[in-house]
């Protein structure tokens, strides 16, 4: 090709020189015994097309669209080279070229003749504004349609959209967002179904194991079509499911049907023939180790392991911490589950909270702010919080909490003076004689530690509890905070050294160091001092909480903390926790 350079003009020879450059780069890579991927990469770099196609694709227009297609083709070629090299590491470039040539699908002009008989496959969004005689909407399964999984959670897309619409993201709770997502999914399905002119097919699968089940929308669509068929004789006939098919043709469904037959047929004195036959079939399936066939695997049949309470009066007063009292007043079931393995103490928020609490008390002593920050960073290097970016974020959040606490400490000195940190509390509330209430017979021993004990201008003790959580409760909720009230009551009962029984407490404060405040340094929620009437009221609440902790029955109670409770799968008050239903 070199002998033609002198005979061709510059315009004619330029493409030839570019081709020679690419071929030369590929030959050099082959001579260096590089693999197929590296040879392709060297040829691509030598072509210089990247610097032409990329800007053209960004500019848009017809030329940009063509550049997009060209770049996509090169990416596909590199993917093919990667797959080829993985399967045949020692194959030559020539073999790769032959492989690509064999993959080429020749264009057939006759394919245009059958275009009208093709099937259009598209998403529900892409179907908007289009219609077909026959539309099939497959895979309408629970968890897929509707899909209520949060979207854009890393960038908080939903909150950003709310801000643009003038809505405070904090005003929209999780339940409301779920309802909005459900409505969006329902509208999208109806859009897909409304694309049919003559016939609509909506399908779902149930495998009998619970892994795949029809969507809740299936019944809604059938009802809508049924109403349409009744109101208009010209509407197409709605084909209902055969009412004789009352179970899925799968082994787990068969086992469930046999079990239901056995349980229904043993209510009388003698089992029914159907129950006997079902029990015989279950026994045969159990011999084959079919899951769920043996009665030992049936839910709800086993007796309780014990009816003994967790505490008896002979053991002395019921010992509880103020945080236990707070949990018991919210939900006694959550309290007992978290106290017996239901709480993961190794979670990053728990680790961060423990470290901040420790350093907060150190800051109140002789340690300087710089020493506290250095100690935090030294400890943090030994904490495993997973990803590096998450560790850096949590460390930054912990340092900000220390800064907010220092700001609160400085701002509050005009009203409060320190009495002590980590002050031990040990107070006893005796049973109330002569009362018919079961809780009145329970003696309560309040044991714990106050994060900070302060004194107001009159010398009354003020309880300060440092919180590292992100959610700050309302003033009304803080006014009835059980933990603060329990500490105040313990002070009144003489449970803190230096304060005699009968002392008038000076109230309490919750200091949320994770939420900065320009005035107080950190967000503060106050509880007023307990009056004699409130003291009597809180004595009843503490006795009720202690009685709820005895068992053996613990009640699941709906409360504000249900939204972030990690035990919903074990809670009968939640839909996901109702694995056993007692009729």
Image: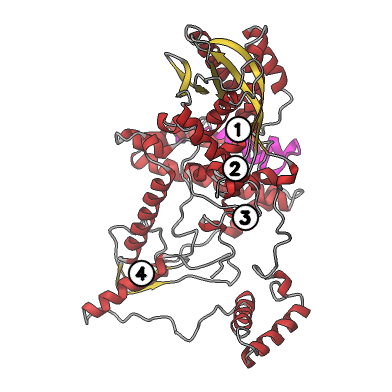
- Furthest-bottom residue in view? 273
Question: Closer to the camera: disc 2 or disc 4?
Answer: 2
Q: Is 39 covered by the magenta stretch? A: yes
| Comes first in the chain, label 4 or label 3 | 4
Q: Secondary structure at mark 2?
A: loop
Above-or-below relation of 291 to 565: below
Q: Which region is colored magenta? A: 26-53
Q: Is residue 576 left or right of residue 271?
A: left
* Crowd class of label 3 (few under 14; some 14 to 19; many from 20; radius 10 Å): few
Residue at image coords 61%, 69%: 209
Mark 1 secondary-structure assignment: helix
Q: Which residue carries the number 4 mark?
A: 221
Image marks 3 and 1: residues in contact by CB distance under 8 Å: no
Q: Which structural element holds mark 3?
A: loop
Closer to viewer: mark 2 or mark 3: 2
Is 226 magenta? The answer is no
Cα–Cα gap, marks 1 and 4? 53 Å
Q: Counting other residues with Cα less than 10 Å from the Cα at mark 4, is it few (<14), some (14-19), or many (20 or more)? A: some
Q: Are marks 1 and 4 in contact (CB under 8 Å)?
A: no
Query: Would you name the residue on which mark 2 appears?
Result: 433
Q: Earlier in the sequence, mark 1 or mark 2?
A: 1
Q: Position of residue 104 (x, y in %)?
A: 55, 58
Q: How many marks?
A: 4
C-alpha distance separating marks 4 and 3: 43 Å
Main SS category, magenta section? helix
Judging by the rendered image, the residue that carries numbered circle 3 is: 553
Circles 2 and 3 in contact, beta carbons < 8 Å: no
Q: Which mark is residue 322?
A: 1
Q: From the viewer's perspective, is residue 221 above or below residue 245?
A: above
């Amino acid at each position: 090709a070199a002998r033609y350079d002198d005979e061709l003009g510059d315009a004619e020879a330029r493409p030839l020189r570019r081709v020679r450059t690419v071929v030369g780069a590929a030959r050099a890579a082959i001579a260096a015994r590089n693999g197929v991927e590296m040879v392709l990469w060297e040829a691509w770099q030598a072509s210089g097309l990247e610097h032409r196609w990329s800007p053209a694709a960004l500019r848009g227009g017809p030329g940009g669209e063509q550049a997009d297609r060209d770049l996509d083709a090169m990416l596909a070629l590199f993917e093919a080279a990667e797959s080829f090299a993985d399967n045949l590491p020692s194959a030559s470039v020539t073999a790769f070229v032959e492989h690509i040539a064999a993959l080429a699908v020749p264009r057939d002009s006759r394919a245009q003749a059958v275009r009208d008989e093709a099937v259009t496959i598209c998403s529900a969004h892409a179907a908007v504004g289009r219609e077909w005689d026959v539309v099939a909407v497959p895979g309408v399964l629970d968890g897929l349609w509707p899909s209520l999984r949060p979207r854009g959670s890393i960038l908080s897309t939903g909150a950003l959209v709310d801000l643009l619409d003038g809505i405070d993201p904090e005003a929209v709770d999780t339940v409301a967002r779920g309802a909005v997502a459900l409505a969006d999914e329902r509208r999208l399905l109806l859009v897909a179904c409304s694309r049919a002119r003559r016939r609509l097919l909506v399908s779902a699968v149930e495998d009998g194991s619970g892994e795949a089940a029809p969507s809740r929308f299936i019944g809604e669509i059938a009802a809508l079509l049924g109403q349409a068929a009744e109101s208009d004789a010209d509407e197409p006939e709605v084909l209902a499911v055969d009412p004789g098919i009352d179970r899925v043709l799968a082994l787990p469904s068969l086992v469930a049907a046999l079990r239901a037959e056995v349980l229904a047929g043993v209510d009388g004195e003698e089992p029914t023939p159907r129950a006997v036959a079902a029990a015989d079939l279950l026994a045969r399936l159990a011999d084959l180790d079919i899951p769920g066939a043996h009665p030992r695997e049936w839910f709800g049949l086993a007796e309780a392991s014990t009816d003994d309470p967790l505490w008896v009066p002979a053991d002395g007063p019921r010992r509880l911490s103020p945080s236990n009292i707070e949990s018991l007043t919210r939900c006694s079931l959550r309290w007992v589950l978290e106290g017996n393995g239901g709480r993961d103490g190794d979670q990053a928020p728990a680790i961060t909270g423990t470290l901040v609490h420790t350093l907060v008390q150190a800051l109140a002593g002789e340690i300087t702010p710089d020493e506290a920050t250095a100690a935090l960073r030294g400890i943090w290097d030994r904490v495993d919080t997973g990803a590096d970016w998450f560790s850096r974020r949590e460390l930054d959040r912990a340092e900000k909490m220390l800064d907010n606490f220092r700001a609160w400490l400085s701002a509050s000195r005009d009203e409060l003076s320190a009495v002590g940190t980590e002050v031990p509390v040990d107070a006893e509330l005796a049973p109330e004689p002569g009362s018919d209430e079961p809780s009145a017979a329970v003696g309560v021993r309040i044991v714990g530690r106050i994060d900070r004990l302060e004194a107001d201008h009159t010398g009354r003790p003020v309880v300060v509890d440092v919180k590292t959580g992100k959610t700050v409760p309302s003033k009304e909720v803080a006014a009835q905070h059980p933990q603060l009230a329990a500490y105040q009551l313990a002070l009144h009962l003489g449970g803190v050294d230096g304060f005699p029984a009968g002392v008038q407490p000076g109230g309490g404060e919750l200091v949320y160091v994770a939420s900065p405040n320009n005035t107080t340094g950190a967000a503060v929620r106050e509880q007023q001092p307990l009056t004699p009437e409130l003291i009597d009221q809180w004595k009843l609440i503490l006795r009720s909480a202690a009685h709820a902790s005895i068992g053996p029955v613990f009640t699941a109670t709906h409360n504000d903390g249900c939204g972030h409770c990690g035990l919903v799968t074990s809670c009968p008050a939640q839909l996901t926790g109702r694995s056993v239903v007692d009729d």
